Image: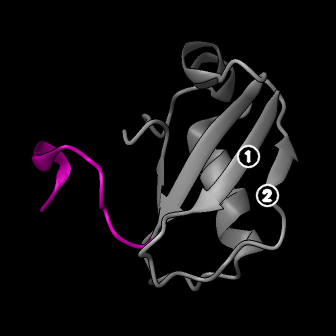
Amino acid sequence: MQVIVEKAERSDIPDIDKKKYLVPADLTVGQFVYVVRKRIKLSAEKAIFVFVKNTLPPTAGLMSAIYEENKDEDGFLYMTYSGENTFGSPSLQA
C-alpha cells in the first residue's frame, strides 16, 4: 500500500525527510507511527498524533484496513502527523 505522510500546517514538530512509504498490509497503525517517529527523530517524551481524514485511527488497527477505508482516488492513503491532538474528537483529549 502506498502512503503519503505530511506534517500538519501549524505543528511545531520536525519535518519528515521522506513522505512516500510502501507499507506492508499487516503493519499496525502503531507500528507505522513508530516508523514516522524514527524518521523525524522525535524524542520519547514528545507526543505524536497521526490522522487520516482529520481522525485518529486506532493504534491496533491494521494499515490495510485503514487504507481500504480511506484511500484516495489516486491510490494513496494520505496521513497527517502533529505534535498536538489538533483534529481528534474531544472525548480523546485529556
Look at label 2 and name its amino acid. Lys
Q: Position of residue 69 (x, y in %)?
A: 55, 14
Q: Is residue 1 left or right of residue 4?
A: right
Q: Position of residue 35 (x, y in %)?
A: 73, 59
**Residue 16, quarter of the rendered image:** bottom right
Picture disc at residue 63: none
* Residue 86, magenta (yes or no): yes
Tell whether label 1 touches label 2 (CB within 8 Å).
Answer: yes
Residue shown at 77%/23% (left/top)?
74
Q: Report the magenta stretch's main SS.
A: loop
Q: Is residue 37 left or right of residue 57?
A: right
Quadrant (top left, top right, bottom left, bottom right) of the C terminus: bottom left
The residue segment tinted magenta is 83-94
**Residue 45, quarter of the rendered image:** bottom left
Q: Position of residue 55 (x, y in %)?
A: 37, 39
Residue shown at 65%/23% (left/top)?
72
Determine whether the residue tagged by mark 2 lies in a helix, strand or loop: loop
Look at label 1 and name its amino acid. Ile
**Considering only vertical position in the picture, is 28 above or below 50?**
above
Residue shown at 82%/27% (left/top)?
1
Task: Tell me if mark 2 has few (under 14), some (14-19) or many (20+) residues whose alpha carbon lies within 10 angstroms of its own.
Answer: some
What's the CA distance linking mark 2 and mark 1? 5 Å
Chain-order first, disc 2 or disc 1: 1
Q: How many marks?
A: 2
Residue shown at 70%/18% (left/top)?
73
Q: Position of residue 4 (x, y in %)?
A: 73, 46
Say which residue label 2 marks: 19
Say which residue label 1 marks: 4
- Answer yes or no: is residue 21 visible: yes
**Considering only vertical position in the picture, is 61 above or below 14?**
above
Q: Is residue 80 left or right of residue 68?
A: left
Q: Residue furthest right?
A: 22
